[in-house]
Image: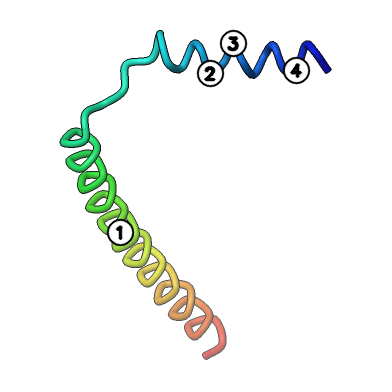
């Protein structure tokens, strides 16, 4: 149990002393970038899904009929 406690303590110490944390402004800007990219990616995925669904539907209608 002492090893686990020591590991957690050292991990927190490393986070405090060795990690460069972004400023609040950077966090806000990057959050906006991620949100915009997520919306664009979701729209692209929806578009590709719609195109493939129509193509598969057309293919099966062509085979049936």
The x, y position of residue 59, in whole percent, is: 48, 76
Q: Sort mark 4 into few (<14), some (14-19) or many (20+) by Cα contacts within 10 Å.
A: few
SS assignment at label 3? helix
Point out the tag, 2 or 4, that comes first from the N-terminus: 4
Point out the tag, 4 or 3, that comes first from the N-terminus: 4
The mark lying in front, picked from 3 and 1, is 3
The colour scheme of the drawn protein is rainbow
The mark lying in front, picked from 1 and 4, is 4
Above or below — where is 12 with respect to 60? above
Q: Pick whichever, 54 or 62, lies toward us.
A: 54
Residue at the farthest right position: 1
Point out the tag, 1 or 4, that comes first from the N-terminus: 4
Q: Which mark is residue 12?
A: 2
Point out the tag, 1 or 2, that comes first from the N-terminus: 2
Q: Sort mark 2 into few (<14), some (14-19) or many (20+) by Cα contacts within 10 Å.
A: few
Point out the tag, 3 or 1, that comes first from the N-terminus: 3
SS assignment at label 4? helix
**Gap between marks 2 and 3, in whole Å?**
5 Å
Q: Which mark is residue 10?
A: 3
Residue that carries the numbered disc 4 in the rendered image = 4
Determine contact: label 2, label 3, CB under 8 Å.
yes
Q: Sort mark 3 into few (<14), some (14-19) or many (20+) by Cα contacts within 10 Å.
A: few
Residue that carries the numbered disc 1 in the rendered image = 44
Q: Residue at x 26, y 45 (%)?
A: 31
């Amino acid at each position: 149990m002492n090893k686990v406690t020591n590991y957690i303590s050292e991990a927190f110490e490393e986070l405090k002393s060795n990690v460069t944390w972004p400023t609040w402004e950077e966090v806000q800007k990057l959050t906006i970038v991620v949100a915009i990219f997520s919306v664009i990616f979701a729209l692209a995925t929806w578009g590709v899904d719609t195109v493939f669904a129509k193509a598969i539907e057309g293919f099966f209608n062509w085979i049936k009929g």
